[in-house]
Image (cartoon, rainbow, N blue to C red):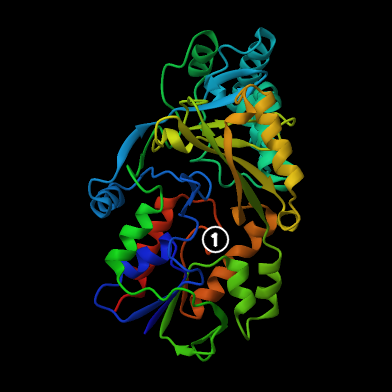
Amino acid sequence: MIVIIGAGLAGLSAAFHLKGREFRIFEQEGRPGGLCRTEERDGFRFDHAGHLLHFRDPRLCAWVKELLGDNWMEHERRAAIFSQGVVTPYPFQVNTFGLPRDTVLECVVGLIQARGQAEQRVPAPEDFSGWILHAFGPGLARHFFFPFNEKLWQRDLREMTADWVSWSIPQPSIEEVVAGAIGPETGKFGYNPTFLYPRQGGIESLPRALAAAVGRIETNRQVIEVHPKEKEIVLQDGERVRYRKMIATLPLPELIRRMRGAPEEVAAASRGLKHVSVLCLNLGLSGPPVSDRHWIYFPEPKFRFYRADVYSSYQPEAPGRQALALEISLRPEELAGAQTDLLDSCRQAFQEAGWIRDPHRIIHQSAIPIPYAYVVYDRHRQKQLPKILAYLRAQDIYPAGRYARWEYGTMTDALGQGRDAAAEIGG
């Protein structure tokens, strides 16, 4: 018997790829999907933060398209940054055209100086703050990278390592940066210039399709204890289930906390892992669209939120209606105490910035808390994570997914890790 804990994308993918093998999949929530979820409120659709499908593995792309049938659309990314009262295309480093002249000059000159140091083989610092300066120079750091990332990660960037940035942060050439300073956007940069999104039903259409292909999923079944020595789990209702191997997709600290008999060294290492939470302020609007962008970054400290997701640009609402969300990053201990005042101040700042000129257009407001949103790459993680994962593997436990592997991954990474865990388990 193979046990799968969690029916998010990684768990569902693992179950799908365990064809012909006996397994049980347990999900503590009332429906599968994990954070790949869409809520319908007052007729508006809101995802649990922005969820897009961009592929580096063509096999995964073909599989997802097959799962969704004709319920998908390909989009060319329309993302932007709002700073100094100006909307510029994403990514910031190649789209400074339109910003104040002094800002553009500071950004371009700083990047040229930084690349000059790189040519002299000055090694890149290991901390994230130093890496930003080394890669982009002080101008781009001051006007975008520092304020945005300090807001997202809720900590001094010198506490973070830079061993996650290679695929997620575009590093254009000097020529591309200069071209983006003297004229409008000329190309697409980054890992997601195009993406897929369902035509109907929001992003939850994907786990629904995957769940239908998997078959029986045991929902409202929370695992409260894991006994690795006996290879047994205990569910909240008291049922005990023996297993041969396990695929675990719940957050790594939650898994270790449920384990009985784990070495104190492993337990302590797990307790030291850090993450940030996110609170999504959902807004349902009447009238014309506030933007045709898919999402907009807000790097400046005066905005408590770091991004606006315009869901209606992925999947249009009925005419005269638009759904969007403001994403607010919080330390985990702050999430439970997040008050209405915070949400109201974010909405007001968004309005005062000119995005919603008539407050009467807001006909729906709600919030979605995301306790585990982004894992923090710091020196503790760098040193201790391999030990934790090695211990789990020795117990025939295979972590899969963003939070089980404690990494910065995409939805398609989660699908791939579920597939790979199923393959590794074998017969």
Q: Residue at x 45, y 54 (%)?
A: 36
Look at the image and tell me whether residue 121 can be seen.
no
In-image side of 152 versus 399 (left or right): right
Q: Is residue 224 above or below residue 169?
A: below
Q: Is residue 352 above or below residue 326?
A: above
Foreground: 359 or 3? 359
Foreground: 323 or 135? 323
Foreground: 223 or 374? 223
Give the structural element (helix, strand or loop) at label 1. Answer: loop
Mark 1, other Cα within 10 Å: few <14 / some 14–19 / many ≥20: many
- Position of the N terminus by quadrant: bottom left
Residue 264, position in %: x, y? Answer: 70, 79
Residue 177, position in %: x, y? Answer: 53, 18
- Residue topped by disc 1: 403
| Amino acid at pointer 1 | Tyr
Q: Is residue 27 above or below residue 383?
A: below
Foreground: 397 or 340? 340
Look at the image and tell me whether residue 349 can be seen.
yes
Residue 376, position in %: x, y? Answer: 64, 52
- Answer with the quarter of the image where residue 82 lies: top right
